[in-house]
Image (cartoon, grey):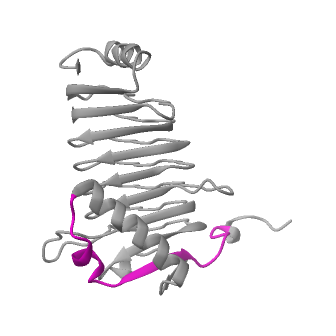
Amino acid sequence: MSIEAGLERYEKVNEMIKAELSKKNLTSVKNVNGQRYIGCALDRGKTIRIYGTPGNDMACYLNGGRVEVFGNCQDAVGNTMNGGEIIVHGHSGDAMGYGMRDGQIFIRDNVACRGGIHMKEFEQMKPVLVIGQSAGSFLGEYMAGGTIVLLGLGLKRGEKIFGTHCASGMHGGKIFVRGAFPKENLSANIKVMNLGNEDKKELDALVKKYCKCFKADYDEIMAKPFKKLVPATSRPYANLYTAN
């Protein structure tokens, strides 16, 4: 049995989801029309399948659960998630993965501005964001850890893989970018590097998972080279502060 969201208020939809997941580990929500907070703090072992367009803060504070969207998403998906998995068969709005601490997000198509803003990692907690097509401005802004993969699939002639101010304020983590990219859109504190052996292993596993999620062609993706973007310093704004 699936839950019908329709034009119900988000509070009621989330109450119905909670009730269903108290009895079983999987539920589907159909005809979603912008209802917010779906999958908020979802625990490990629980899965929600969403059909339609979920509203802001979908899967915020995700706590090990799995959320799969058959459609597009609005803003702040995976906000401050602690672990788990988000798979989106479409596009996503602004601030995707804001402050995410662990877990993985796979977006089939585009992400708007500020994807991966303030991602962070600690010991074994290493968040991942994989984007199939392009990203808007400020990708990886203030990024402190984790991995972003930007594949640039299906771009039209003249379309850039990421917007302006890419990795602005980035002071940790890494971004793997496939194919050509606009160096003029990179922030001044970013270094462009070749991939090492460990980078290649990590990238290979993530590309294979992307292909499994969306039935993409692994050989086609890997036919183009990747570069790695990393911060030149862990203190990009040190000159703005008075020395101790």
Say which quadrant the C terminus sits in.
bottom right
**Which residues fall within the magenta stretch?**
215-237
Q: Does the magenta stretch include residue 221?
A: yes
Q: In this view, does 25 lie above or below 194?
A: above
Farthest-out residue, bottom: 194
Closest to the observer: 52 or 117? 52
Q: Position of residue 221 (x, y in %)?
A: 26, 75
Q: In this view, does 135 lie above or below 29?
A: below
195 displayed left or right of 153: right
Res 214 quadrant in image: bottom left
Say which quadrant the N terminus sits in.
top left
Q: Position of residue 99 (x, y in %)?
A: 53, 48
Closest to the observer: 231 or 175? 175
183 displayed left or right of 9: right
Q: Is residue 174 magenta?
A: no
Write the residue at 42% across / 75% down: 186
123 displayed left or right of 86: right
